[in-house]
Image (spheres, rainbow, N blue to C red):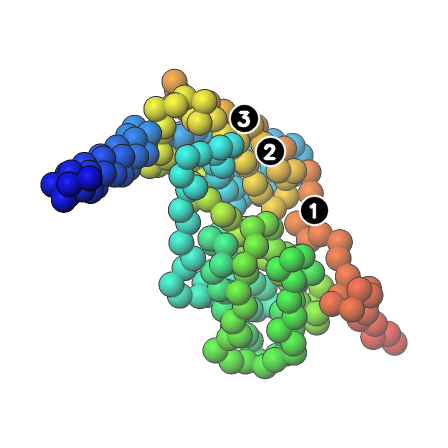
Amino acid sequence: MSEYRIKFSIISFAFLYLLVFLYGNNTQANELNDVTTIKGKITLTGKQAGKAKLEDVFVYYQPIKSLLTPKFVPLSEPLDIKMKNKAYVPRVSVIPAGSEIRIENADSILHNAFSPSRPNNFDLGLYKKNSGKIQRLSQPGVVKLFCNVHYHMVAYVLVLDTPYYARVNKDGRFEINNIQLQKNTSFNKGRLYLWHERAKKVVKKINLPLTGELNFDLPITKRRIPAHKNKSGKSYKKKRRRRRY
């Protein structure tokens, strides 16, 4: 084979490779066609609905399958949670998986923040008033926060592995924006989750894009302070009342 033919073959092969590379990238990019929004309204129901907060409802969307995995980015700074006046503030939070929380003791008494929620379980130990201890929550799920000293101290951190979520406002409305649509409509299916600390999690299958707003009833059935044990798996000690004579 002549030197000219060899050079021509190499150039042709390189050109063909370049076309395949560019076509492949463009095909993947073109699969993402547009973005859409999920809007709706939540109504709390049940006898205890009046004692629950609509703002403590979180709605999040998980695609069933996707050409590109939805990207979620851990927080660059820890989420601050305070133990103040023998209560967690805020009581309910949401963070992307892999983020950190900082639990500060703002009281002049001792507290012991811990969580039995596997696989994100932890125990920060007994500590006095300080600027806080940091804990990373790596896996998605609901993380319940308790205090080993005070039974009534409860908080929740919803850890998500999707960027598509929203907190319901005081009117019960929510809006999840910038959800990627794909040209292959079979990929525009997913599950919508409704979560409130005092309700059973609701899961709904939906197809995108929606033709209108969604409306859901969310029954409040759980106690404000869930039954739980201390970090050793034992019952909390009840304080003895002083006898009055």
Left-right relation of 66 to 151: left
The amino acid marked with disc number 1 is Arg
Left-right relation of 214 to 91: left
Position of residue 155 relative to residue 113, above or below, is above
Q: Alpha carbon of mark 1 to alpha carbon of mark 3: how far?
A: 28 Å
x and y percent of residue 31 in the render?
33, 29
Q: Count all numbered tags in the image, as a single digit.
A: 3
**Residue at image x 70%, y 69%?**
148
x and y percent of residue 212 in the render?
39, 20
- Which residue in the structure is indicated by mark 2? 202
Nearest the viewer among 230 and 49 is: 230
Q: Residues within 10 Å of mark 1 (few under 14, many from 20)?
A: few
Left-right relation of 64 to 49: left
Q: Residues within 10 Å of mark 3 (few under 14, many from 20)?
A: few
Q: If you read the primary sequence from the N terminus, does the residue marked by circle 1 or circle 3 appear first?
A: 3
Say whether residue 109 is visible. yes
- Name the quadrant containing residue 68: top left
Q: Residues within 10 Å of mark 2 (few under 14, many from 20)?
A: some
Residue 205, numbered circle = 3
**Residue at image x 68%, y 53%?**
225
Nearest the viewer among 197 and 65 is: 65
Q: Alpha carbon of mark 1 to alpha carbon of mark 2: how far?
A: 17 Å
x and y percent of residue 191 in the render?
52, 31
Label 3: state its secondary structure: strand
**Residue at image x 50%, y 42%?**
58
Picture quarter with the N terminus: top left
- Which residue in the structure is indicated by mark 1? 223
Say whether residue 82 is visible. no
Label 2: state its secondary structure: strand
